[in-house]
Amino acid sequence: MSSTTTEQDLASLDWTRRLIAVDTTSRNSNLELIDLVAAEVRRLGVEPLLVPNEDGAKANLFATFPAADGSTDGGIVISGHTDVVPVDGQDWFSDPFSAQIRDGRLYGRGAADMKSYIGAALTLLPRLAEADLSTPVHLALSYDEEIGCVGGGRLVAELERRGIRPEFCIVGEPTSMRVIAEHKSVNVFRATFTGVAAHSSLTPDGVNAIHHASRFAVAFAEMVDGWRENGPFDPGYVVPFSTGGVNLVHGGIASNTVPDRCVLEFEFRSVAAVDAAEVTSRVRAALAEIDARMRAEDPRAGVAVEVIGQVPGLRTPPGSAVLGLGADLGGLPSEEKVTYGTEAGQFTGIGIGTIVCGPGDIAQAHTADEWIELDQIAACEKFFDALLARVTA
Ligand SMILES: [Zn+2]
């Protein structure tokens, strides 16, 4: 499908180019980008709420364009994440942080995921500021989405603390402008098994961290296999059951030494019928049992578990008002449930009706030579035109 849109048709490219030019790989600070946006919303007369991370190197931004009567209650959130995945080891045709247009496509890191959406949103802001709005419109930008929706969790907690309760939220991950109502939860953990080193001929003097880690890995694999064999099943997904795995292991120093350390990283992704909190408790209980067993062997041994990231599933019921909103604004109806996690589940978690709908295809996200069709950017601009018409009606 070739693009019929040309560069001149698009109002949002200036902003999108500026956003792509800031290297917001998750390991970096996002403050340069946040400062750009904060300056723009202040220029338009709105004071943004900044929600920093622990060390202040990153921040979420939340800005409310109030209704004409001054009300900031309810309204629609336009939500995006500012961070992008690394380009390390990828072979790019052009500089990933300098957007280029070739053959009807915009190339650059974040072109699809998700700076074109944010660029179109920022282009809408001056028009929002000028209009008499019937309901508020909020802009929500987060940090560290790509490493487990870390910033989003902090942002929704802060909104809840302040009693800020918008009615609807549109998370602009690349769905090719389809309206997506469901995705699985994503839950990522790290377990560090601390044993006691010894010569491998003197096993009673040591505690074998790898053996104990293996006990957990086997139990976890059995749980995951159970989902695959017995469900619960949800045919809306490409993989119609909950999945999981121990996906990284580090441990041991030599074949003749009882290992004193083994680290496992593991995850699970659950369908709606599987309670992620309940699975998390089972995981913790299994590790606590192994911890007790290791301590019984030697009080210096044990297991520590950390949650790396936990993204709630999104399940917006059929018939929800927010699905009607997405369709009214020109989002394409879709039965599909997506396999990737987003911040949408975090917004529904505080009672905001949420959909995922944004320009570009997830297939190009995270890849070398990431691109988005200019047609998709045009569709997103039209979507925001429709949003403006809706909130000024
Ligand atoms: Zn994304």
Image (cartoon, rainbow, N blue to C red):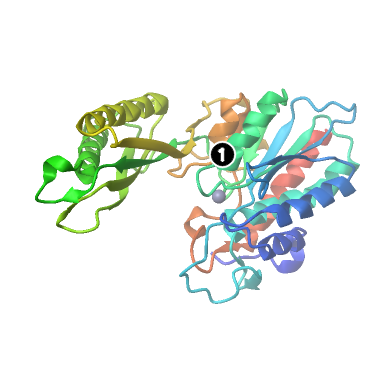
149 sits left or right of 234 in the view: right
Task: Tell me which corner region of the image, top left, top right, bottom left or bottom right, holds residue 215.
Answer: top left
Task: Tell me which corner region of the image, top left, top right, bottom left or bottom right, holds residue 2.
Answer: bottom right
Residue most extreme to the left? 201
Query: Is residue 174 visible in this depiction of the protein?
Result: no
Which image quadrant: the C terminus? top right
Q: Residue at x 73, y 51 (%)?
A: 34
Residue in the foreground of this view, choosing between 71 and 224: 224
41 sits left or right of 164 in the view: right
Q: Residue at x 65, y 71 (%)?
A: 101
Residue in the foreground of this view, choosing between 255 and 11: 255
Question: For numbered disc 1, what is the local secondary structure?
Answer: loop
The location of residue 192, given as percent across then percent down, is 34, 42
The location of residue 208, given as percent across then percent down, is 20, 43
Residue in the foreground of this view, choosing between 253 and 312: 253
The location of residue 212, given as percent across then percent down, is 22, 39
Read off the residue under disc 1.
343
Residue most extreme to the bottom? 93
The location of residue 205, given as percent across then percent down, is 16, 42
Task: Tell me which corner region of the image, top left, top right, bottom left or bottom right, holds residue 138.
Answer: top right
The CB of the residue at mark 1 lies under 8 Å from ligand 1: no
Count of numbered circles on the image: 1
Query: Is residue 157 visible in this depiction of the protein?
Result: yes
Kind of residue at badge 1 = Glu
Q: Residue at x 16, y 57 (%)?
A: 255
67 sits left or right of 335 in the view: right
Circle 1: is it few (<14), some (14-19), or many (20+) Cα within 10 Å?
Answer: many
